[in-house]
Image (spheres, helix red, strand yellow):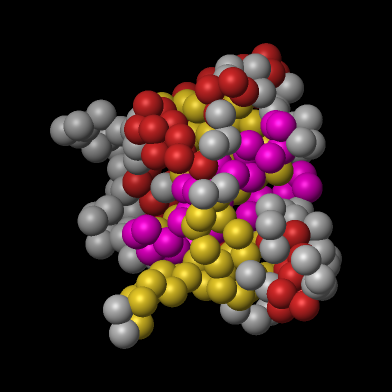
Amino acid sequence: MAGFDDITGGGLPRGRTTLLVGGAGAGKTVLALQFLMQGARHGKEPGIFVAFEERAERILANASSFGWELEALMPKKLFIMNAQPLPGLVQSGDFDLGGMLAALKLQTRAMRAQRIVLDALDVIMALLPDLEARRREIYRLHEWLLAHQLTGLITLKADAQEARDISPQALGFMQFMVDCNVILNHEVVHGISQRTLRVQKYRGSSFDENESPFVIGKRGLEVRTRLREASPP
């Protein structure tokens, strides 16, 4: 990914889990899809996108402007799983991720997937009754990802008031559990949109800890690092 590999020394940790945190419109889904697209197309690593918030059709429509041609990769190299909670779903005390993980296991084996994205995990966590249940399911998910040696990317809202009582504090323990933590910021200053990315944590590797500006352009997300800016054209 343009610029991001420079910051991290080669990209996201292979076979480990990364947490991607950001507010609405920060670019989480774009980065996640780009991660899968590049793995499938250039790295020959098939990937699965688990969508908890938007349906596959909307995700593909939103990504069409980047020229990635995601449909050409489906379904053998890229698979999008619709996993949105049903409208009006009544919370049950015994809800867990077991059924979803069983389906993912079959899909992972069928396409020999090596990468996986779980987009807007806070949406599905809102179905669980308390913090203890959320911790239990998060640990179950993390152990499943490690057992299957998948390079995982979990996206989480930084400001999730719309998702019941889920908050960064409630799921803050995830930052300590994962091997890499990336924060996306998006704000408007004096009428100008500004986006920045910061790698907060990366176990076992040196990385640039400073904020780096990025843009979402015609080809997707591109990080503007000092290293890249100093390089000749």
Residue 199, x across and y down, in percent:
64, 70
Residue 10, x across and y down, in percent:
80, 57
Nearer to me, 33 or 127:
33
Give the image quarter of residue 150.
top right
Seen in the image, is 160 located left or right of residue 158?
left
Seen in the image, is 112 located left or right of residue 121?
right
**Can residue 189 be seen in the rendering of this structure?**
yes
Residue 38, x across and y down, in percent:
68, 40
Rendered view: 226 above or below 167: below
Nearer to me, 53 or 10:
10
Can you say which quadrant of the picture contains the C terminus? Answer: bottom right
Q: Residue furthest front?
A: 233
Rendered view: 53 above or below 73: below
Q: Residue at x 23, y 56 (%)?
A: 162
Q: Which residues are magenta?
A: 14-41
Q: Residue at x 59, y 21 (%)?
A: 72
Give the image quarter of residue 117.
top right
Seen in the image, is 44 located left or right of residue 28?
right
**Can residue 183 be seen in the rendering of this structure?**
no
Rendered view: 174 above or below 37: below
Q: Residue at x 20, y 32 (%)?
A: 87
Q: Residue at x 31, y 85 (%)?
A: 190
Residue 55, x across and y down, in percent:
36, 30
Q: Residue furthest left?
A: 88
Nearer to me, 15 or 233:
233
Q: Residue furthest top?
A: 110
Assess whether residue 15 is covered by the magenta stretch.
Answer: yes
